[in-house]
Amino acid sequence: MRTVFYSLIAVLALAGCAKPDPPKLTPERAKVTSVTATGIGFELELDAYNPNAVTLSTRKVDAKVTLDGKYDMGKVTVATPLELPAKKHTKLTVPVSTKWSDLSSVAALAASNRTVPYRVDGTVQLGGDTLNVDVPFHMDGTVTHEQLVQATLNSLPKIPGLNLP
């Protein structure tokens, strides 16, 4: 009987110390907010569901943006302190801005006369200073030809007396 009692206590203790489940991230939308001579901006929207019985905190979002499957826009880190309440869905809205690494690539994309696909791969870091976890996400979308042309035109030096759209 005593063995059963100790076994029951051990099971209850282990259940109380169970590792939290990672939240589920569902990408909802990625919107291009700006295309300028210096870079491109996005607004990412993610639904974060916390399946745990305790509130979790987000710390940051890391994102890597790729244009047209080959132009690496680099990695961006955005601080996003937010609480994810237990057993609830929370919308994460994250502004991401990357800089053009090579302006000639923007001009080449603008000259292609088509929309250009982009890919965002990233992680949301959850937890505290001593214990945290990165939860991955992925999003796809397109940049319009008009946005790329305008970015290219904005990057050209201004010629006095010439008015470009």
Image (cartoon, rainbow, N blue to C red):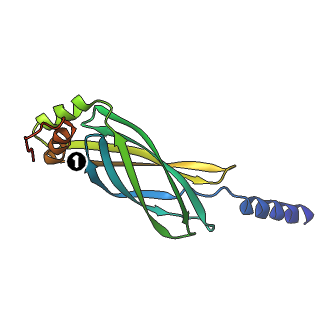
Indicate whether 27 appears above or below 163. Answer: below
- At 27% from the left edge and 52% from the top edge, which residue is drawn? 32
- 119 left or right, relative to 86: left
Q: Residue at x 28, y 31 (%)?
A: 70
Instruction: Look at 13% across and 47% down and name the residue there.
Output: 146
Residue 51 horizontal side relative to residue 147, left or right: right
Residue 11's quadrant in the figure? Answer: bottom right
**Total marks drawn?**
1
Residue position for label 1? 142
Using residue 127 as the reference point, say whether residue 70 is left or right of it: left
Q: Position of residue 61 (x, y in %)?
A: 48, 50
Q: Which residue reaches farthest front?
A: 160
Q: Secondary structure at mark 1?
A: strand
Amino acid carrying label 1: it is Thr
The location of residue 16, given as percent across then percent down, is 73, 63
Residue 102, x across and y down, in percent:
29, 29
What is the crowding at mark 1: few (fewer than 14 residues within 10 Å), some, or many (at least 20)? some
Q: Is residue 96 visible?
A: yes
The quadrant in which the N terminus is found is bottom right
Residue closer to the observer: 86 or 164: 164
Q: In the shown orientation, is residue 98 left or right of residue 34?
A: right
Residue at 37% of width from left, 47% of height from top?
97
Task: Evaluate whether residue 124 shows in this view.
Answer: no
Asked whether 118 or 99 is in front, the reply is 99
Residue 91: % across, % down: 43, 65
Residue reaching furthest to the right: 2
Q: Is residue 141 above or below residue 103?
A: below
